[in-house]
Amino acid sequence: MFFTLPIILVFALAVVLLLAVLLIRGIFAKAADRKKLERLTEFLSIASHHLRTPMTLIKWTLTEFLEGNYGKLSDDQKRLFHDLVRRNEQLIRFVHSLLDVTRVEAGRVELHFDRVVVAPLLEETVFKLQALAKDYHVSLTGVIPGNLPRIVIDPEAIARVLENIIENAIIYNKKGGAVEIKAEARDGSIVIIVRDTGIGISKEEIVRIGEKFFRTQDAKKQVAEGTGLGVFSAREILKMHYGDLAIESEEGEGTTMTITLPIKSPHENIVFQKERDDIDVIPRNVPVADIKKEQPTPRGNMTVLLIDDDPVMRELLAQRFASEHIVMATAEDGEKGIIKAEEVRPDLILLNMLLPGRDGFSVLGELKKNSDLAPIPVVVLSNLAQREEVQKGLSMGAELYLVKTSYTPAQIVDEVKKVFLLHKK
């Protein structure tokens, strides 16, 4: 029975997303009832959180089983669970694509520009997508010079563009195929080339790539699921950066996507962050574990307080932390969380932002106002994932903002240990 539950949940989520796509199609077809589109954007923003919560539970549960924390699995069970993890990740990507395109259409994409070193951003994206490439039996490599000049971009928006393009190159590849990413400075631009050995695109269809909801016939045969929104949203975001996306392809021979971003951006005058010569600007959502790889990990003598209203998430994380000899205290709402923090005085607090009664932002503010609790590092662990919410959490004093759907329990423990060690110095 337990093994069928994730399958049922994934199917139910897929039906919800299909209905959302059909709804969006209808509104786009009617052109331009702006108010309807804005209402739809609000609806999808709210719905995305409610979709992310069960998707997170599915992901966490399946990965814990795959890691052997609930007993040994047979080879057939492992294959089933790996496939479910992959399909769950597809749903997560669909949610992001739906949100991206509706925000673009509603004119509600708010970019936050920074002067950014491109190499770490590219390396992090390639690192994140290695697991997906492995699932599709595709090799993923990057040739990324470390001396590329800084450019003015919204790093999170460009990261989503890169993820969309590279994900497509992996998913629509051939078994045993390859995806290669190259980057260089050329003619006043940063040029990022994503080349794959996949199914390619016919001459008749390539002119339509980037239209909303358009998918080639071969793409539909290769992967039934898909929204046809990724390239559209990527191209629109690049336009906002005065960049471009060029596509070359031959049917059956693979596709090359070329992203260009200006080194001297018209957005230079709105960059307010001071540039420090000795620090490369890395997006704040890059995991601490990947920035501080050389750090050892603590064993024992550490207490973490988790403030989260979902009992299954609390149980999964408590078991994972216990396996690392880390004590975990829990609280199911904000008020109890503050009381528990005063009682336990944990070494670190993991805080969900959507809580019953008092929300996580209010709790974070209260913790940082309390002279006894303020020194305790807080790591946000939430499915509130909009840029404004992430920035708000960090500006209020959170050390790190982790989006639940992007991490497994084991990875969350790694991030927490790194923050703990940084504060012990």
Image (cartoon, rainbow, N blue to C red):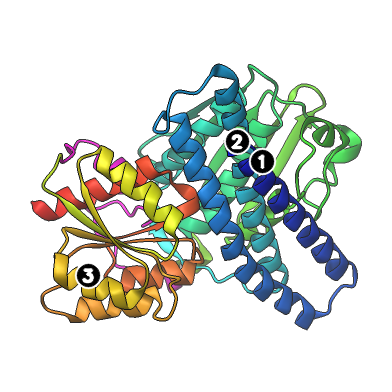
Q: Cα distance, mark 3 to mark 1?
A: 37 Å
Give the prevailing secondary structure in the magenta stretch.
loop
- What residue is disc 3 on? 340
Horizontal side of residue 366 vs 170, given as left or right: left
Q: Cα distance, mark 2 to mark 3?
A: 36 Å
Say if the magenta span includes residue 16. Answer: no
User: Contact, CB < 8 Å: mark 1 with mark 2?
Assistant: yes
Instruction: Please give the name of the residue rendered at 33% of the width and 44% of the height, measured from the top-left corner.
Output: 319
Query: What type is the residue that disc 2 sits on?
Result: Phe
Up/down of 242 relative to 182, above or below: below
Tell me the quarter of the picture where residue 1 sits.
top right
Q: Earlier in the sequence, mark 2 or mark 3?
A: 2
- What residue is disc 1 on? 7
Instruction: Please give the name of the residue rendered at 10% of the width and 75% of the height, measured from the top-left corner.
Output: 372
In the image, the segment drawn in magenta is 269-298
Residue 421 visible in this rendered orientation of the protein: yes
Category of crowding for the residue at label 2, using alpha-carbon neighbours closer than 10 angstroms: few (below 14), some (14–19), many (at least 20): few
Label annotation for residue 3:
2
The location of residue 75, given as percent across then percent down, is 55, 17
Horizontal side of residue 148 vs 195, given as left or right: left
Horizontal side of residue 83 vs 393, given as left or right: right
User: Between residues 361 and 57, which one lies in front from this camera angle?
Assistant: 57
Residue 107 visible in this rendered orientation of the protein: no
